[in-house]
C-alpha cells in the first residue's frame, strides 16, 4: 500500500491554502498603500503606518501558524489520516526547524500506521533527525518513532523485533516524559506495550495497560479506539 498521488483535488487544496495564507496580507498591503498615498501626513506619519502594517502582518502569520498546529493536532487526535497526510505534505517542504519538522514527520508516520501501511510509516521516519533536538524533545520523538517500529514488527509477526524496539526506544523514553505534558506520547507507548504483550500471549497485563488508555481523559479518540480494538483481542 502506498501513498496516493495528490491529483487535481490535492492541487486545488494547495491553491486554496496558498490563497488563505497570502490573499489577506496582499489585500491589506494594497489598502495600506492607498491610505498612505491619500493621507495628508509627512514621512514620519507614513513610517508609523508602515510599522502598524508590519505588526498586523505579524499577528496574521502568528494566527495562521497557531491555527495550522491546532488543525493538525485535532486531526491526529480523531484519527483523520487523510487530513494529517494532506497537512504534513504541504507543511514539510517549507518547514526548516528540526523540532517542527519532527512533529510533522511523526504525525505523518502515525497516520500511515493507522491506515495499516506500516511500510510507508517506517519510510516516513527516514526524515527524522533526533540528534538535532533538545533532550526532552528527543525523548518524545524517539519514543513515538519507536512505537511505529513496534507496529511494523508486529504487522510482520516479528514479535522479537517488536519487543526489542519497545525495550530500546519506547520504555526508557517513556520514563523520561511528564505524563501531564506529553499524554499523547505516553498513550502511544502504552498502546505499543499492550500490542507486544498481546502478541506474547500475556493478555492479563495487556488489559491492565489498555485500561490506562481508556481511562485517560487526555487520550485522543483515535487512541481510545485502538485500545478498544486491542481489548477485544484480549
Image: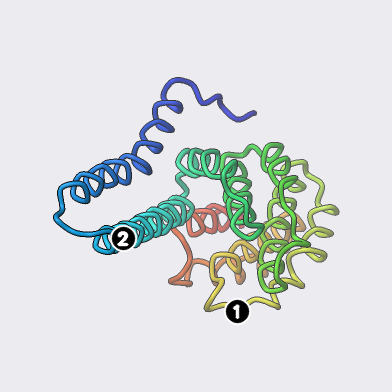
3D distance between C-alphas at marks 2 and 1: 47 Å
User: Number of numbered discs present?
Assistant: 2
Tag in front: 2 or 1: 2
Q: Is residue 29 left or right of residue 21?
A: left
Q: Which residue is mark 2?
A: 47
**Residue 175 screen position, x and y as percent:** 70, 77
Q: Quadrant of residue 174?
A: bottom right
Q: Is 142 placed above or below 118 here?
A: below
Q: Residue furthest top?
A: 8
Q: Which sits in the foreground, 26 or 199?
A: 26
Earlier-in-chain disc, 2 versus 1: 2
The residue under the point 77% across, 58% down is 200
Q: Which residue is mark 1?
A: 178
- Seen in the image, is 42 located left or right of residue 221? left
Task: Say which residue appears at 70% left-offset and 63% top-offset.
Answer: 143
* Nearer to the camera, 23 or 220: 23
| 7 vs 45: above or below | above
Q: Position of residue 187 (x, y in %)?
A: 58, 66
Q: Secondary structure at mark 2?
A: helix
Residue 156: image x %, image y %? 77, 41
Residue found at x 55% / y 24%: 5
Q: Nearer the viewer, residue 25 or 198?
A: 25
Please identify the quadrant where the C terminus is shown.
bottom right
Amino acid at each position: 500500500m502506498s501513498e496516493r498521488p495528490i491529483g487535481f483535488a490535492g492541487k486545488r487544496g494547495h491553491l486554496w491554502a496558498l490563497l488563505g495564507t497570502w490573499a489577506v496580507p496582499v489585500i491589506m498591503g494594497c489598502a495600506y498603500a492607498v491610505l498612505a498615498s491619500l493621507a495628508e501626513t509627512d514621512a514620519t506619519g507614513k513610517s508609523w503606518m508602515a510599522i502598524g502594517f508590519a505588526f498586523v502582518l505579524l499577528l496574521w502569520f502568528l494566527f495562521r501558524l497557531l491555527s495550522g498546529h491546532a488543525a493538525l493536532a485535532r486531526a491526529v487526535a480523531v484519527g483523520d489520516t487523510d487530513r494529517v497526510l494532506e497537512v504534513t505534505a504541504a507543511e514539510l517542504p517549507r518547514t526548516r526547524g528540526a523540532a517542527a519538522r519532527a512533529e510533522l514527520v511523526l504525525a505523518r508516520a502515525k497516520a500511515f500506521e493507522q491506515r495499516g501501511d506500516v511500510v510507508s510509516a517506517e519510510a516516513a521516519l527516514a526524515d527524522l533527525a533526533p540528534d538535532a533536538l533538545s533532550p526532552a524533545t528527543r525523548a518524545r520523538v524517539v519514543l513515538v518513532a519507536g512505537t511505529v517500529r513496534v507496529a511494523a514488527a508486529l504487522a510482520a509477526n516479528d514479535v522479537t523485533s517488536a519487543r526489542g524496539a519497545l525495550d530500546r526506544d519506547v520504555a526508557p523514553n517513556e520514563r523520561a516524559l511528564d505524563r501531564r505534558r506529553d499524554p499523547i506520547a505516553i498513550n502511544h507507548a502504552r498502546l505499543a506495550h499492550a500490542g507486544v504483550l498481546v502478541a506474547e500471549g500475556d493478555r492479563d497485563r495487556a488489559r491492565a495497560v489498555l485500561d490506562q488508555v481508556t481511562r485517560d481523559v487526555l487520550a485522543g479518540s483515535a487512541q481510545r479506539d485502538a485500545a478498544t480494538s486491542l481489548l477485544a483481542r484480549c
